[in-house]
Amino acid sequence: MKMIFAIILAGLLTNNMVLAKFLGICPFLGVSKKVNTAVSMSIAVTLVMVVATAVTWPIYTYLLYPNFTYLETIVFILVIAAIVQLIEIFLKRFIPPIYKALGIYLPLITTNCAVLGITMLNITNQMNFVHSLFNALGAGLGFMLAMVLFAGVRGKLETADIPEFLKGLPITLIAASLVSLSFLGFAGIGG
């Protein structure tokens, strides 16, 4: 139980996919304008991460390893694309407001490098199935933490008096870098 807690805590803080590993930056910058949209996107990404891990770990372990490991990336991308399509169909059918709020960013989860990154990191770090699932959950929760924090920062930026030359993308990137730097303080947790 202690190991699982450590894995989730690492995914949230020290190994945060967005703020420490810089994976998944596109939705981080694109969908983080409103907190509710950021939460919806994060839930979808977390679900895809956990389900993708649950599917790719056994595929790698029992089908690809040791003779076909060179197919890892292409197989993982195909699995992730299929999972995203299923989630998109589900949201369109049962939760249309979230489907419309996420817009183009929902299909882009397929190309979100954080999702592919967590599935490959689980294999690279030789985690067992249960630890891989909790690592994916922690990474998804870390993604959500980063998205919600940054949505709050962007909300404050809208009312701030920003010099004309910094408005738009420049101030967004500066704010993202400062939020990312704040997570360096967690680097010493866990030894």
Image (tube, grey):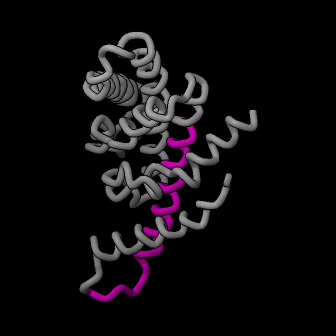
Residue, far right: 1
Residue 145 on the magenta segment: yes
Q: Is residue 33 above or below residue 156?
A: above
Q: Residue at x 41, y 69 (%)?
A: 177
Q: Quadrant of residue 132?
A: top right
Q: Is residue 51 above or below residue 103?
A: above
Residue, far top: 63
Q: Quadrant of residue 159?
A: bottom left
Residue 143: horizontal and vertical position, in percent?
Answer: 48, 48
Dominant SS of magenta comes to helix
Q: Is residue 30 left or right of residue 191?
A: left
Q: Tell me if I can see residue 97 in this picture.
A: no
Residue 2: horizontal and vertical position, in percent?
Answer: 75, 37
Residue, far front: 66
Q: Is residue 67 above or below residue 34?
A: above
Q: Residue at x 51, y 29 (%)?
A: 126
Q: Residue at x 37, y 11 (%)?
A: 63
Residue 163 on the magenta segment: yes
The region drawn magenta spans 137-164
Q: Is residue 1 left or right of residue 30?
A: right
Closest to the observer, 172 or 13: 13
Residue 191: horizontal and vertical position, in percent?
Answer: 67, 54
Q: Tell me if I can see residue 178 in this picture.
A: yes
Quadrant including the N terminus: top right
Residue 41: horizontal and vertical position, in percent?
Answer: 42, 44
